[in-house]
Image: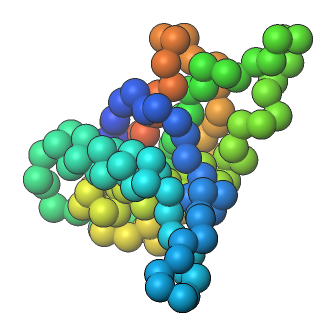
Amino acid sequence: MLLFHFITDVPKHWSPKNNNIIRMAGKRLFCGKQQALINDRNYLILQMRQAWGGKPSLKEYIHAEFKFYFTNFYTKKGEMNLKLGDLSNIIQHPEDCLTKAGVILDDAIIRSYDGSRKLPSDTGQNYLEVILRAFDS
């Protein structure tokens, strides 16, 4: 059963793990996020929250499918671009946003990622598609 279907343009598919930066705070160093990542996260949370419409967060086990469409999917040689983020790393960003937007209670309810993939964009823009379904064991 389909629970949530969401599509939005994104400037970039982020890997939070790979986009940490070291910042100075006085004489101390600390790890933080790039401002562009923070801005994109806030935009994605807002879009997801609006699409969800204020319903209670999903608490039951779910199947999550993330499709990441890239404008630079292929190199000039027509081969898949190996500089695209690892699928396991880029899943983390929208997964975290689903939790912060209140669509899901916690990402621990996700039992399956089958069907998640990186794909070439057919619109000329990077975009993200998220499909949440009830999990059938």
Residue 98's place in the image compared with 52, above or below, is below
Residue 127's place in the image compared with 86, above or below, is above
Residue 121's place in the image compared with 37, above or below, is above
* Place of residue 51 in the rendered image (x, y in percent of width and height, measured from the top left): 21, 40
Q: Which of the pair 70/57 is nearer the observer?
A: 70
Q: Residue furthest front?
A: 26
Task: Judge left or right: residue 7 versus residue 137.
Answer: left
Q: Which residue does the image show at 55% across and 88% down from the upper left?
A: 28
Task: Judge left or right: residue 50 versus residue 66.
Answer: left
Examine the rendering and report whether any part of residue 103 can be seen. yes
Residue 43, image quadrant: top left
* Place of residue 4 in the rendered image (x, y in percent of width and height, measured from the top left): 31, 42
Q: Which residue does the image show at 25% across and 41% down from the upper left?
A: 47
Q: Which of the pair 97/112 is nearer the observer?
A: 97
The way the protein has been coloured in the rendering is: rainbow
Q: Residue furthest left?
A: 54
Task: Judge left or right: residue 75 versus residue 27.
Answer: right
Examine the rendering and report whether any part of residue 135 can be seen. no
Q: Which residue does the image show at 59% across and 64% down from the upper left?
A: 20
* Place of residue 116 in the rendered image (x, y in percent of width and height, measured from the top left): 60, 41
Q: Which of the pair 21/94 is nearer the observer?
A: 21
Residue 9, image quadrant: top left
* Place of residue 22 in the rendered image (x, y in percent of width and height, measured from the top left): 60, 71
On-image quarter of the N terminus: top left
Q: Which of the pair 86/107 is nearer the observer?
A: 86
Residue 60's place in the image compared with 38, above or below, is below
Task: Judge left or right: residue 53 versus residue 128.
Answer: left
Q: Which residue lies furthest to the bottom in this view?
A: 27
